Image (cartoon, rainbow, N blue to C red):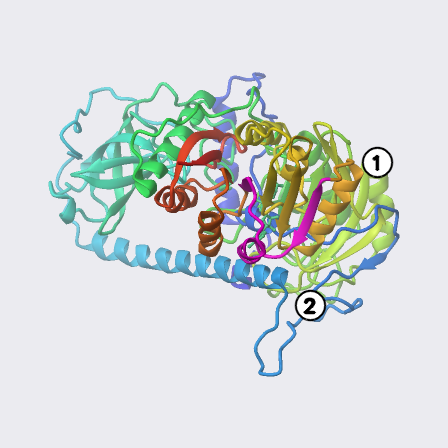
Amino acid sequence: MSEQNSKSIGISRKERKLQTAKEEKKKKRPSGKKKPGVKRSSLPGKEASGERTAAAVPAAQSEQKPAPRKERSERGASTGRGRSSAPARPAKSNDGAERLSPSERYEKRQSERANAASAKQAFGQKKNKTQRETSASGQPYAGGKAVSAGTDMGKTKDGQVGRVSPVAGKTPYASSDASAKRPVAPADAEQIKVGDRIVVTIKRIGINGEGVGYFRRKAVFIDGAITNEVVKAEVLETQAKFIKAKLVEIEKKSKHRVEPPCPVYGICGGCQLQHISYEGQLIAKLEIVREAFSRYSGLNDLKIKPTLGMDRPWDYRNKAQLQVERRDVKGSKSDIIAGLYEIGSHEIVDISGCPIQHPQVNRAIDRVKAVLGELNIPLSKGDSRGGRSDIKDSGQRKGVRTIVVRNGFQSGEIQVTLVTETADLPRQEEMVERLRLELPEMSGLSVNVNPFKTPLIFGERTISLWGNEAMNESLGDLNFTLSPRAFFQLNPEQTIKLYESVKVAAALTGKETVVDAYCGTGTIGLWLAPYAAQVRGIEVIPEAVEDARRNAERNGRDNADFFEGEAEDLLPRWAKEGYSPDVIVADPPRVGLDRKFLETVLRTKPQKFVYVSCNPSTLAKDCKVLLEGGYEIQSVQPIDMFPQTSQVECVTVLVKK
Ligand SMILES: C[S@@+](CC[C@H](N)C(=O)[O-])C[C@H]1O[C@@H](n2cnc3c(N)ncnc32)[C@H](O)[C@@H]1O
């Protein structure tokens, strides 16, 4: 979050825009008619884009017992730092080089990656702006004809479907009377300029949920367009290999196009596919996986199973981590908003009542906001009305930055964690008292201290203010203990399908040795343990390894052991010692598998390799290495863990040829 983007007091231009959008939406809806799965009063969303990154950094697991105001120092750089809010420094070796534990190295790498990504994005945005300005200034305007893209394009119909509500972008589509000022696009893709209008037939949905078509064989990415639609679009950016364009009009509408139910869809950035029917989303996800294998593995005819979806693809998320800000909103009871950053900005979009969060999570967020507001607890972002008088409205200050709420669907427990820059939040006892009254299902309240400006949500130190330091949740027959930072899948209903798919894919007979690489709190390994001779889990975060060991004990899985380290270090070490598992299951973060890890797999040659992936691109790239190394793909099962978003999880089984 940049201080430069701190909000001014009162209603901003963007808020006004948001309110207008909501009002327009209200007008459009038949009165009294409720949208499926959406509360009338609700706004939408999903966690910040760093969710997977943040969630993939599990944390310390402590004994599950009430521990009022007890601080829990976590292993690593912050150990023994007491209540100081001073930034933790990594230990240095004698030669001055950083001496980091595997988990510290992992966190550092994640942070570096995230910083590099945002720098790249910022560079891209700057570049686009320049391009737009340059091109727009020299663009000839000549009548109202758009150039058709490709041989099958340009079938512009009279009386076409014109206006629909804005999707995946903040600007409503232009009306057709704007045609008088339309620039004419050149007939060659290389001469296309920003501001030109083109007609494109959409061939598929891209990995970020955008429609993908071609203009003279050059890929065109158009947010909000759907497969098989013919759309008119305005060019926003031209690159050597692709064009980015904005949807202006839909000439031929897909049968899967639906009205996005959420009033801030396309603004908050949490969802990318709400404008597509659920059936259409499942097909789109299959297309995304197919395209990845074709592009990165060179497999054009791969058989991919239909995406496993949900009966009711709403209210599924068990966790929210929302940025908070104190803001005066006229007509609103609360002066605190909680939400996600608006697409391409540092402004928070309020997402109360988000239709993909479980209602209990939304309710808990509302209660926490109300209590923070009532007690004037300082926030790191917002006006100077509440909180402490020493807090000035000038940039970054110390206070609550993020509210994290996790709900146990089975246990009914609610875990609340406030991420702050400083441990010394005022009125903590009153806060505990008020929250216990307002949120009786709360099983634990913690403060996590993150004094750094980093895209990672959590810092290293977690302090339990009240209740259990860790919450309980179960999946199928297994019971888990989860500390505030511990990774746990976000969609429990689909997680069972995911783990069952892994079980079916592994087809264990009870005799196999199995490695669960990137095991988190040991969930997959424990799921498989009753069907295997032995399970070994590898996980880089020490606290998650402790969780996994505790969970193994709790569930009586005495053939499962969990080891701390990087998968790319431990697997080769075990191989050297002569250990060669029959089956390896790997569930890495989005970056995919490390080269050293892949090379060891090829050397140790397990009969089966079960790859659980949340990123089709890295999945397909890694599979190419395995295919070239003597494996073949037996099955690919996409699973919809995140309905309404463009993300797709896959269980891919590779067997030795
Ligand atoms: C996508 S999560 C999967 C967790 C688990 N399989 C589950 O279903 O809950 C990936 C896990 O890999 C861990 N991880 C990341 N990099 C790692 C590495 N190099 N070696 C081992 N574990 C790693 C993360 O801490 C995280 O717990």
Closer to the camera, 173 or 405?
405
Amino acid type, residue under disc 2 in the picture: Ala
Extreme residue in the front direction: 578
- Can you identify the residue that label 1 sits on? 440
Say if residue 334 shows up in the picture: no
Picture mark count: 2
Q: In this orientation, which residue lies closer to the viewer: 608 or 430?
A: 608
Residue 632 sits in which quadrant?
A: top left
Q: Quadrant of the C terminus?
A: top left
The answer to whether one can see residue 83 in this image is yes
Give the magenta-colored segment's residue range: 559-585
Q: Please, what secondary structure does the residue beneath circle 1 have?
A: loop
- Frontmost residue, 222 versus 162: 222
Viewer-nearest of discs 1 and 2: 2
> Which mark sits nearer the N-terminus, 1 or 2?
2
Where is residue 147? Give x, y as percent.
Answer: 15, 35
